[in-house]
Structures are given as C-alpha cells and as structure tokens.
C-alpha cells in the first residue's frame, strides 16, 4: 500500500503513477538542507552566565549561516591559557583540536602574540574607537590589537547586609573595620550553627588574581606600585608594602580560613553563596551570579522565603584609611586563533560578539559591564 494513494470517498485505492513516484524520489534525493560553516568557540566554563551567552550567540549566528560549536576549557584562569596554547593555538594542532575563538584576559596576551589574529585587519579605527580606550590599550601589543573587548571587571567587596545588622557593624571602609567585623561574625555564626563560618574570603592561590590583590593591599597602605613607570626602578621593597603583606598573612586562621592560600575564584565564592561567609573579595561579574543564585533543590530564587541577593551588598575594597583604597581593572575579550581554517566565518562571530546587541544582552542577562562607550552611560545599563 505504500505506493498507493487513497482518495476520500473512494472504496478502492488507486495506484500512484510510476512517473510520479520517480519524480518524488528525485526531489528527495536532490533536496539538501543548507550547509552551515562551523566555528568553534569557548565562551567560558559551564556556569549560567556563560551558558546564557553561548545560547544567544548560537541562535543568532545560525540565522546568519554559521554553526557555533562550544569547546570546553578548564575553569581556572591560569589553566585556561596553558590549555589553549598547548592544545589549540598552534600550526601542528591535531585535526580534532579545533578552537577558533577563546576568552582572554589582558595579562595573558604577552605569551600568545604570535598565535593570534590582529583585529586591526578586520576592525576599522573608527570601530575600535567605540570601545573603552583602556581595554583596547590593554589588548594592544607591539602595535597589534590581539583581542576585542568583551566586558570590564574589577575587584569588589561583597558582604552580608543582614549579618552586619545582626552584629551591629557598618560596611567596613578600612582594613581594621573589616578585621573586627570578620572575627566577630565568624565566631558568632560558627557557634550558632555548629559549623565553620568564614569571616573574609579571598583568592590566595598563586595566579594573577592574587597578584592584583597584593597590589591593592600595598597601594592601600601607601606602598606605591611594584615599579616606577618612568624610571623602571623596582619600588616594591618598602616598609608600607611589607606591612600590607604581613597584615594579610596575619589573617590566616582567624579573619580568613587557613585554606585560602590554595583556593581560586570558584572555591572562594562557594562558602559565600552557601551562606557560610560574611565577606568576599571577588570580581564585579559575580553580581549577576548572586542575583540568579539558588542552591540545588530550590525551585525558585529563594529558599526559606528569603531571597539571597536581597541580603548581599557590594562596596569598594577597604583601605588603610577611608580615603586610601584601590581596586584593579580587569579586561576580558575575545581572541582569534590565527590558524583557524574558517577565518571569514570566525570573524563574523567576533563582529557579533563585539556588537551593541550582544553587549546589551550580556549587561541585561549577566550584569556584565560593557566595553562599548555608549553603553557605559546608557540608562538601561546603569539603571539611570
């Protein structure tokens, strides 16, 4: 019966003419779906903010004829750059090791200058001038722009508003105030919950995050910078810098858990998100994660009728005095592997990643700070 056509109201089936069967078969044989060119991208590790961005970019680029495929990478920043260099960004990479676009931080690029596409070959100076000039400068090496800015980040102090009120503290503006509040809350909450409750969490593992934290500590104690930018002389060896480092060292086992020197961003934020820490030094992009945070098992953004984000505040990092406090800017962007076989399609994706549409999406969905100057003053982004 598969070659028969039954007409409505007929008692007997009628056979489909053989020529028509051949015609249909030829149409099916000749018809093919549009072929999309694949581009391989690492948007970051498997967390909500990166997943949101990947889903959006994949949807938009599919409409433009490009199939964006996701490539995983280690969650730790210092592991990611080694992984990219050793596995992907090389002319002799294995055929299956394909990564065209990857996330970079400005401090990584010095070790990758000969493996990346110069964005000035694909973006006009007028287009580059639309970005925050600090980020473009951060991605420029030997006259080449090696990444297109994605978002800005800086270190902030996250704190529990409800615990400050409970223990009668104000938001700490000095290191002395932070130490006093951390110790009191840690001891009180540990006794109350019968668990280990941390005072102040920060990233102590040996990587660029610790370097920037040390810079902030030293600068906030009046210790200056690591070297003089004009003379090139090393200036870090001074009494104020030593005092700053000794202060941080004294936190271990009291203000700060003794495990912190082995912990990275992903390890230090968990106690805070799980309500087992009073203070956390982290990057500003965590604001979006806090607002969407829900522990496993919660069906809504609140557990026990309390929304976690409503009990979290953010502030400048403390200093030796209220006026003497510093932070570090972080510039994240997208670089392109110069060995990619599909360079034209890859740059189409990068152009979209750099667009106003995509930066607005990241600002609204993830609360990322845009790098496009016009969006940095846009009321929809700044809540103005």
Image (spheres, rainbow, N blue to C red):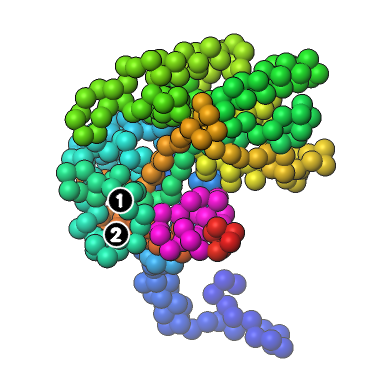
Q: Residue 245 lies in magenta, yes or no?
A: no
The percent position of residue 96, horizontal first and vertical second, equals 31, 40
According to the image, label 2 marks what residue? 128
Residue at 52 percent of width and 42 percent of height: 284
250 versus 375 height, above or below: above
Q: Is disc 1 in contact with disc 2, using a CB cutoff of under 8 Å? A: yes
Badge 2 density bin: few <14, some 14–19, many ≥20, Cα 10 Å: some
Residue at 59 percent of width and 84 percent of height: 14
The percent position of residue 36, horizontal first and vertical second, equals 37, 61
Residue at 65 percent of width and 20 percent of height: 180
43 versus 124 height, above or below: above
Pick the quarter of the image with the N terminus.
bottom right
Q: Viewer-proximal residue, 204 or 326?
A: 326
Q: Secondary structure at mark 2?
A: helix
Pick the quarter of the image with the C terminus.
bottom right
According to the image, label 1 marks what residue? 136
Q: Residue 367 lies in magenta, yes or no?
A: yes
Question: Which residue range is magenta in the image?
Answer: 360-378
Badge 1 density bin: few <14, some 14–19, many ≥20, Cα 10 Å: many
Q: Is residue 257 left or right of residue 37?
A: right
Q: Viewer-proximal residue, 369 or 70?
A: 369
Q: Is residue 100 left or right of residue 177?
A: left
177 versus 51 height, above or below: above
Q: Is residue 116 left or right of residue 15?
A: left
- Measured Cα–Cα span from mark 1 to mark 2: 7 Å
């Amino acid at each position: 019966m598969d070659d028969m056509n039954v007409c409505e109201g007929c008692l007997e089936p009628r056979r489909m003419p053989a020529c028509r069967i051949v015609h249909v078969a030829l149409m099916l044989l000749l018809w093919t779906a549009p072929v999309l060119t694949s581009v391989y991208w690492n948007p970051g590790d498997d967390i909500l903010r990166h997943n949101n961005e990947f889903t959006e970019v994949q949807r938009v680029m599919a409409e433009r004829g490009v199939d964006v495929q996701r490539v995983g990478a280690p969650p730790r920043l210092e592991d990611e750059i080694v992984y990219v260099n050793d596995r992907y960004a090389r002319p002799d990479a294995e055929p299956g090791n394909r990564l065209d676009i990857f996330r970079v931080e400005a401090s990584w690029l010095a070790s990758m200058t000969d493996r990346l596409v110069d964005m000035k070959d694909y973006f006009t100076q007028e287009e580059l001038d639309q970005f925050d000039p600090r980020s473009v400068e951060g991605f420029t090496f030997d006259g080449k722009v090696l990444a297109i800015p994605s978002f800005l980040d800086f270190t902030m102090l996250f704190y529990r508003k409800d615990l400050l009120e409970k223990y009668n503290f104000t938001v700490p503006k000095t290191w002395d105030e932070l130490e006093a509040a951390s110790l009191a809350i840690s001891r009180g909450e540990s006794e109350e919950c019968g668990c280990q409750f941390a005072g102040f969490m920060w990233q102590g593992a040996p990587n660029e995050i610790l370097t920037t934290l040390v810079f902030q500590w030293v600068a906030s104690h009046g210790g200056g910078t690591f070297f003089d930018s004009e003379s090139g002389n090393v200036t870090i060896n001074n009494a104020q810098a030593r005092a700053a480092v000794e202060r941080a060292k004294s936190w271990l086992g009291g203000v700060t858990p003794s495990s912190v020197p082995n912990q990275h961003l992903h390890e230090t934020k968990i106690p805070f998100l799980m309500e087992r820490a009073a203070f956390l030094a982290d990057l500003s992009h965590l604001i979006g994660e806090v607002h969407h945070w829900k522990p496993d098992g919660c069906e809504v953004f609140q557990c026990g009728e309390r929304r976690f984000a409503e009990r979290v505040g953010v502030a400048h990092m403390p200093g030796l005095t209220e006026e003497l406090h510093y932070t570090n800017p972080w510039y994240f962007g997208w670089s392109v592997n110069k060995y990619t076989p599909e360079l034209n399609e890859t740059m189409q994706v990068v152009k979209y990643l750099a667009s106003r549409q995509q930066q607005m999406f990241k600002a609204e969905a993830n609360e990322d700070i845009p790098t496009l100057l016009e969006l940095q003053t846009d009321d929809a982004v700044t809540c103005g």
